[in-house]
Image: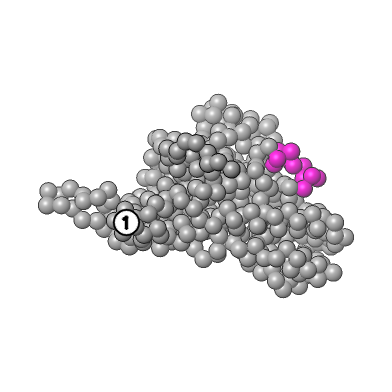
Amino acid sequence: MPAMAGKFETSEDWHPSTQVVHAGRAPDPHTGAITPAIELSTTFARDPAGELVGEHLYGRYGNPTRARLEACLATLEGGAAAATFASGCAAAQALMSTVAHGERVVVGHDMYFGVRAQYRQLSKRFGIDLREVDLRDERAVEACFERPVRFVMCESPTNPQMHLVDIARLAARCNAASTPLIVDNTMATPLLQTPLALGASMVMHATTKYLAGHSDVLGGAIVARDDDEGFAAIREMQRLGGAVPSPFDCFLLLRGIATLDVRLQRQTDNAEHLAQWLAQHPRVEAVRYPGLPDHPQHSLARRQMKRPGAMLSVLIEGGEAAARQFCGRLTLATRATSLGGVHTLVEHRKPVEGPDSTTPDNLVRISVGIESIADLERDFAQALD
């Protein structure tokens, strides 16, 4: 087959599977090293006239390794700029730190419990009008706009109940009110879903998960569609709050991102097979996975996502005790918090989230890894049978 004509003007012209390998990772112009060096310095020199030698001043404000990571994330999400943080919760807190007393914030009723708990505490402490609504319900959303809304935050798919939110429709409503929509894209990743292209203002990530991919580094990020006043407030919170990732953390994240495409394709293949198999098992009450035709929003998943991803939740027949027993009998899959790594992880969510959780008692969240699907199926079969 002949080579395609033309040339790449920027990294934005690359296919996403190429971007994950090369974005933010250009060979060093001085040494030719194809793996970027880790710049550990926390401070940067000035010349005799007092001017900075380079573009960086102090490690909390910026670092060359962090700059490469942020450039990579902005490219992957199709954004203008990115700010990285020491964790996903630090990124979420930076967003909330831009909200003034009395302002309204709207979030999805089904969301990661750590961010929900954080936002509830901050809203009580600082007098923020926090509304938790089902973002699939247009009337519930419309009711929130009876007064100005500082921002709307949604997950899609949601964690852990695997609901989907129509991002384009919600973004249109938010944009009509000049309200930023922030989409947590952690579970889908920019390879499977691009919220900024659907109209969202910003994307948030717990980079700990799929982007890093190996359960060995914490991180968070916010990517903005426009490098505007709204993002400037986030950048200010990043610099003043100081919850920034270390240079080594940024290096690990860049290295993990390079294999995101090959990992995620294998994980999604495994998840699709496992979801179909579990849905036929007599001890399974229900499987919540956007790739299954009986998922209530399967058509939205096909329209909004390139593939349904590698996360699924399963409701075990027999209630809480049966779910606990199922998790306890697994030998290959690991019982652990978190998601997105190469290992298959399972977690009985209700006990983790606490008494005010709306998660069903018998729901087990599964983050499907890259192991042999035959081995995973055998492990799940013996745990259920």
Instruction: Tell me if 351 is positioned left or right of 202 in this view.
Output: right
Q: How is the image coloured?
A: one colour
Which span is picked out in magenta?
292-302
Few, some or many C-alpha atoms within 10 Å of disc 1 (few <14, some 14-19, many ≥20)? many
Q: Is residue 55 visible?
A: yes
Residue 17 pos. (x, y %): 55, 49
User: Front-most of 160 and 56?
Assistant: 56
Residue 243 pos. (x, y %): 41, 56
Query: In the image as oriented, which residue stretches furthest toward the top?
Result: 176
Q: Is residue 197 magenta?
A: no
The residue at the point 31 percent across, 59 percent down is: 31
Q: Is residue 326 visible?
A: no
Q: Can you tell which quarter of the image residue 235 is in?
A: top left
Which residue in the protein does label 1 denote? 59
User: Front-most of 32 and 343?
Assistant: 32
Q: Amino acid at mark 1?
A: Gly
The residue at the point 29 percent across, 61 percent down is: 41
Residue 50 pos. (x, y %): 15, 49
Instruction: Tell me if 73 is positioned left or right of 339 in this view.
Output: left
The residue at the point 24 percent across, 50 percent down is: 54
User: Front-most of 137 and 371?
Assistant: 371
The residue at the point 55 percent across, 64 percent down is: 215
Q: Can you tell which quarter of the image residue 329 is in?
A: bottom right
Answer above or below: position of 220 versus 378: above
Quadrant of image for the N terminus: top right
Instruction: Tell me if 260 is positioned left or right of 325 in this view.
Output: left
Query: In the image as oriented, which residue stretches furthest toward the left?
Result: 48
User: Front-most of 327 and 142?
Assistant: 327
Residue 223 pos. (x, y %): 47, 44
